[in-house]
Amino acid sequence: MTTRPVAFFDVDETLISGKSMLLFRDWWDALHPRGERPCALEGKDRSELNRAYYRRFAGVPAAELQSAGREWYGAYRSDPQAFVLPAVTALRRHRALGHLTVLVSGSLWAVLAPLAADLGADRILCASQRVGDDGRLTGEIVRPVIGPVKAEAAAVLMASAGASPEDCFAYGDHESDLPLLRSVGTPAVVGDDPVLTQHALREGWLRLPTETGALPLAAVG
């Protein structure tokens, strides 16, 4: 039996041109205005900011958030500059080669699931939102899937799939993706983040431009 290599893709500003969490937050808040404002989070680290983001959905039925994610994505994908075309092309190339394609993101499942279905990605590694016995979100997550946690989650998946990290691929746009990129044999930098660019130039990593556009039609056959 031949083990399938795995290709991991960050999402925000790697596959899509925007930041899905912020775009969805603005869309959601426009439909569900609140009288109070969230407390200031200046000086908090990225993990705490990520956890604070999910607390805004406390009490929301999980099924409602999933439906909202599909509705948001349906509107987002119509933007003529919504996708980073070189990365989308790379994901489709990996699919054509029979590789396992995986989205890895700190964003929420509700917006990632329709994207994954649209692109044909096989798996999603993201924050798991806790759901109460009543089917409503508690506002808490198991852990933020950002920074080193992306690499940890990727390592678990590669081990469970029996894939050698040296045979696997990863794509990211921000220095926080560095642990993920370094966890595989073939990393690729999307865009011109200075930290990642330095590593790419020094270590001969693949670099992709950030040309944006509408989602191209998948090739037939």
Image (cartoon, grey):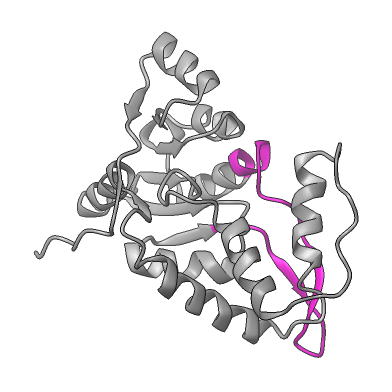
Q: Nearer the viewer, residue 22 or 90?
A: 22
What number of labels is visible? 0
In terms of depth relative to the viewer, which is nearer, 192 or 169? 192
The answer to whether residue 58 is left or right of residue 162 is right
Q: Residue at x 68, y 82 (%)?
A: 62
Return the x and y of residue 198 as percentages of the image width and height. 48, 13
Q: Is residue 1 left or right of residue 108?
A: left
Can you give x and y, in whole percent of width and height, for residue 213 in the image?
Answer: 29, 52
Side (left or right) of 141 relative to 30: right
Q: Quadrant of the C terminus?
A: bottom left
In reply to whether residue 132 is colored magenta, the answer given is yes
x then y, percent, for residue 119: 33, 62
Q: What range is drawn magenta here?
A: 125-152
Residue 74, placed above or below residue 219: below
> Residue 19 location in percent, x, y?
54, 51
Farthest residue to the left: give it: 221
Front one among 78 and 139:
78
Where is 186 relative to 82, above or below? Answer: above
The residue drawn where x is 42% and y is 64% is 116
Q: Is residue 160 above or below residue 115?
A: above
Image point 50% across, 73% down: which residue?
Answer: 72
Q: Is residue 1 visible?
A: no
- In terms of image quadrants, where is residue 163? top left
Is 135 magenta? The answer is yes
> From this viewpoint, which residue is outermost toward the top?
202
For the point 37% across and 21% down, the residue is 205
> Is residue 194 at least partly visible in the picture?
yes
The answer to which image quadrant residue 189 occupies is top left
Residue with the most extreme bottom position: 134
